[in-house]
Image: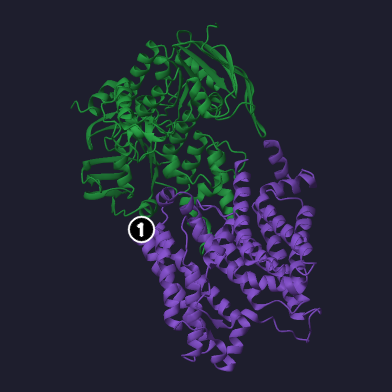
Amino acid sequence: MSEYLLEMRNITKEFPGVRALENVTFQVRKGEIHALVGENGAGKSTLMKILSGFYPYGTYTGDIVLDGQVQKFDRIRDSEHAGIAIIYQELALVKQMTIAENIFLGSELCKGKGVINWNETFQRTSKALKEVGLKLSPASRIIDLGVGSQQLVEIAKALTKEARVLILDEPTAALTETEADNLLKILDSFRAQGVSCIYISHRLKEVARIADRITVLRDGRTVITDAKTAMPEDRMIQNMVGRPLTNMFPRRPRTVGETVLEVKNWTIQDPLTQDLVVKDVSFEVRKGEIVGIAGLMGAGRTELVMSLFGVWGKKKSGEVRLGGKPIEIHGARDAIHAGLSLVSEDRKRYGLILGMDVKENSTLASLKRISKLGVINKNEEIKWSDKYVKELRTKTPNLEQRVGNLSGGNQQKVVLAKWLLTHPKVLILDEPTRGIDVGAKVEIYNIMNDLVDQGVCVMMISSELPEVLGMSDRILVIHEGQIAGGFKRDDATEEKVIYYATGGA
Amino acid sequence: METAVVKARAGEGGLIDLILGSMKRNSKQYTMFLALLGIWVIFSFVTDRVFLTPRNLSNLFVQTVTTAILAIGMVLVIVAGHIDLSVGSVLGFAGAVCALCMIKLEWGVIASVSATLVIGLAVGAWHGFWVAYRKVPAFIVTLASMLAFRGLIIGVTGGQTQGLEMASEATAGWFKAIGQGYLPTLIPATDGQVHDTSLYFTIAMIVVFIVAALRRRAARVKYGFPVVPFFAEVLRLAFVSALMGGFAMIMVIYLGIPWAVIFVLALTVIFDFVARDTTFGRHLYAIGGNPDAARLSGINVPRHVFGLFMIMGLMTAIAGIVSTSRLNAATTSAGQNAELDAIASAVIGGTSLMGGEGTIFGAVIGALVMASLDNGMSLMNLDITFQYVIKGLILLLAVWVDMAQRKK
């Protein structure tokens, strides 16, 4: 019996024209949490897709060995039978169904042939929910659950399949700090029970906290596998990007100018629930500064900026002034016309047309400028989108590349290009670095700095405290729809922000 | 991979590379074209070469017209993520109204046609209102119209075929030309001879095409963008011109180019331009690809959808006019199943029912495929049972090939 429960030996996987993985070896011990880190496009997801049988046996070279036996998975079901469960970055739950239905989807508990045994289904669901610490009825519908709870349902689902190896791909990307914390505790308890976890994350702090060992992938190769104790954060980053990263949050000295955006007594109602989600918020943004907006998930940050942009909620009171003049915004058109831009938190849902190419996405919000009488000047389109591809250093083979084929960081740059092409006075960024790798993050930060230097005002919502603290000149903390506190950069600390964000005022 | 792109851009790649690259990029168009030619060759064999005679091909093009006009509108509707099931019934209704204007009201051709077009726009506005501003799924809105207008056809015609011989002779003659007439010649010519005006028209089209292509190239050079080497450009233009000329010559040496074919060509060029080169077209693709992202990019989604359905209504009315003219009568069954032919043409032409993807040119080729099947199987005297079965299977096959290609 080898010391490893699972071994992936010399895995090589090629796509037409690209070698995604080259001779990768990856080993997992029983009851360990093994973190897999690397930049986007390093091959983490491909490796996991091979392990889960998404890419069937024969489409790659090398061996998967589980319990000393070579495995030949033809589909995902085979790997599940072997005890490998994967929880995807994008949740794969049927939203209209209940927790219990989702957990046993595809492997329904039956009495006789094809008749579902609801009693046992509910009983086993309750048990699984208890194990992941969710106090919810098995009959709750997924649609009514927050993202954090949904993530836990996914894990509960894996548990009912008696998984021995649990693969978590960016499980905390959409979670708040407390939810993430909770998740990590549950993983701790799994470790104690002898379940092995493969943990993929861009949040290196979490990796440092939870992992026993860490493997770094870069350009489809294993760079290093080592115990966590031997791999502090800076060494992880160095291995990931292949060079030492001196300054995660590049700051530049700046002078703050006149007030550009002024929001007064802004109160917004949720059109569905009738709740007030933004209450009497007033603030201003000045030329040459980055204003960070911190707060917990669900505090009303996204609702605040979406309502300023005119695409969400019902305005109950409030006024927006831009450059001293009051403006009325009844939709994205008005907002863009006035000089606002909103890079939304969910780039695939709100930011990009995945089937369109780089240039078409880049020019989507500013087609008017490159058109005459409604006819697009295709050459102008190429000129402008190419300019921003170069300026933002977007990695794409050409302008005709579908954005769906780009990595997360490069997709985000295309979204940025789209908004920069509208020449905004105020650029609002909602979670601008979610799900993108360290190298690309720093590039986005540099772009933000460049914009501020060019006189654009930047507002940034972020759930990552180091990012908010590192990049903002001023920080506003939102709690339950209200501004609970505001700091200058030099006065802000993580403790203070958390204190106000959790309602400790 | 990257180096290949760079090479092609720099214009240093060999001719073969260029051709292969272009085929790879436009593989969908090529596949469709090859499929069409394949179908023609097969029919030519089984019909003892009757299929490929100028006479039959010329008829085939005319038979394609109604479906092609509907398919052009349908592509845009499907691209924007909607569907229009009513086009068959509305086509029949519009055609009936047009006929009745001439027969019962004794209006002239221009007045009758204009009235019909206005009715088409009104029907489209009705659909657009419910889909865009009342958020009722297009499937339901147009399904309702499909039923309602089939009833209205019976209502306005009294359940009787309205033959155009009941209209004044001058009006009927004029109107007949829309669907059955040919470009008149300067020097009289018969079947098998060159029809002069049609030939001049063809040459003019090819010249316009070449000039447009060269101007596009010049603009790219002015912007400093890479262009393919000049000899390759010449080769491409020669190839496409020969293809255009070849198709046209079939008609030139039969009875000349039919007016209806000229309509379709014009509509194809106009809507291909709308789809690819206008903000309106681009916005439709964005709406179909991701309505949320489109909205947040400042696109007025309802207004575009409303306009889109009006265009579809207009196209349906045009198809109705052409169809009535071709039949020389308004019948209660006119346009039956036309919506299915139009949707099938669009889909065979590479339009994705998921929205956001599809080309006008592809749909027109798709319509030609559908019409070829009808025409060829009729020539073979194939039992109508099999005609339906085969058309159904071809549609299934076409979409499967498309999906399989997409996966790669």
Mark 1, Cα crowd under 10 Å, few <14 / some 14-19 / many 20+, is: few
Chain A, chosen colour in render: green
In the picture, the quarter occupied by the C terminus of chain A is: top left
Q: Is residue B95 above or below residue B105?
A: above
Name of the residue lying farthest toward the left:
A505
Chain B, chosen colour in render: purple
Q: Residue at x 41, y 53 (%)?
A: B298
Q: Residue at x 38, y 49 (%)?
A: A339
**Is B81 on the left or on the right of B54, as rendered?**
left
Local SS, label 1: loop
- Whether residue A35 is visible: yes
Q: Residue at x 65, y 51 (%)?
A: B28
Residue B197 lies, in percent from the top left, at 74, 80
**Residue receiving disc 1:** B135
* Residue closer to the observer: B96 or A183: B96
Residue B368 lies, in percent from the top left, at 65, 64
In the picture, the quarter occupied by the N terminus of chain A is: top right
